[in-house]
Amino acid sequence: MLYNNSMKIYLTCIILHLVWIPCFSQSLTTNLHDNLFADKLNEFSKFVPLNNGTLTYGACLLDPKTFIHQINLFKAEATRKIKNKSNEALLKKDIDYFTRNMVEYYVSHYGRDSLAMATIQQINSEQQSNPNYSSLIKEASKKLQTKVLSISERKFLNQFVLGSADLNDPELFKRSGSYREWIDSYIYNLNIDRQFRYSSSEYENRYLLPLEAIYNKIPPGFIKNHLTYQYTLFALRMVTNPQKLDSLYSDFAGRRENSENKSEIDQVYHNLVLSRPNSLAPDFSYYDVNDKLIRLNELRGKYVYIDLWATWCIPCKAEIPFLSRLVSNYSDKNITFLSLSLDKSSDKENWVNYVKNNKLDGIQVIADKDFNSDFIKKFNVASIPRFILIDPDGKIVFANAARPSDPALRSLLDQLLK
């Protein structure tokens, strides 16, 4: 699970986490719980310093033997507190996987300099629209790592995280968030090196890698069925290539053990088929900042470029300067730019103030039920920013169009708006 990756991959991870990971809607509603050892964080903080539930920079500067010693002291004390409880065996497992996750976090953050990380975060929040953004991040990242684990230390810690682990404990899976987190991390890390070998045109293959790991590594049963459903649903919402989507759906539908969740996957796939190029776009009626009702169908006669965003979404706001330039540059062309906010209704006033204070261009409307709005659900939107391009006849050109910051968008618009 813990790899001795090159610095290039390491820095790429940092940049991807800061820039390209979108803002997601709320997690899927399930019958899973986290109701075993409830006081884990409070107890753990007595042995290792935490900040908002995660290890502090100081904790990640401890030498490995000292850190593991503190981990074992915590486990001993936690085990003492659960002794003779009716569910003692489950509680022990919950504590065990909690500590495995803490060790993995320690390894991934070991030796980081807090000031360098603060600089990176500042660049991320203030400089995303800067053309030299990636270079600024890379330069700041050179000062990030002050200590590096040796091969033997990594092997020692790797054994702690992976040793004697069980991939098929359904009762624990249903009741322990720590166990589910560990399995998700296990699945991700099986293919971590492959994640960074794809070219930009193959980027979507990343969303398929977890399913490959699940099929090959997770034993048949409840956990495998749930993970297959969970990751298939996520991949369907992130992948745009029609052939890959068809293959993804067929693979899921062809597995008999997936029948329990098939209806939801069927609906998502059905929406994808309906949102393919040349399909008629669904209509919506949403209010703008002045409480004027805007209907999508009333905008026919022009291309419509829709920006799905929210005031809390940093990657969304990073696109605003690029979108403003598009609005200005194509003001005399046959295209309308519309920004559709997915802020919650309770945050409408905040959205109105943000739009007015920043003098945002184009038509500005807010969805009635954020991510649960009919229009949003019909496009299977799970994350933002997201962009949709519709032609003058109301037909979909791209359900997942290029971002304003992507030069490919200008090339496309220049071609369409000749």
Image (cartoon, helix red, strand yellow):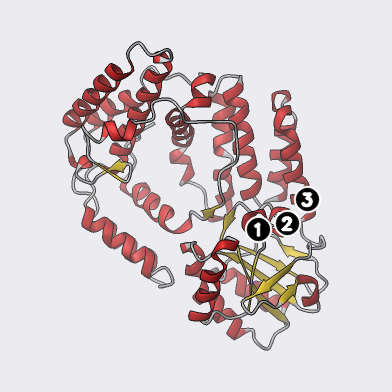
- Find disc 1 in the rendering and name its residue: 369
Q: Which mark is residue 273?
A: 3
Badge 3 or badge 2: first in the primary sequence: 3
Give percent across and percent down for residue 239: 63, 49
Q: Are there few (<14), some (14-19), or many (20+) residues within 10 Å of tag 3?
A: some
Q: Residue at x 35, y 23 (%)?
A: 96
C-alpha span from label 2 to label 1:
8 Å
Task: Please say if 60 is above or below 174.
Answer: below
C-alpha span from label 1 to label 3:
23 Å
Q: Are there few (<14), some (14-19), or many (20+) residues within 10 Å of tag 2?
A: some
- Find disc 2 in the rendering and name its residue: 374
Q: Mark 1 touching mark 3, by CB under 8 A?
A: no
Q: Secondary structure at mark 2?
A: helix
Q: Mark 3 touching mark 2, by CB under 8 A?
A: no
Q: Are there few (<14), some (14-19), or many (20+) residues within 10 Å of tag 1?
A: some
Task: Please say if 53 is above or below 214.
Answer: below
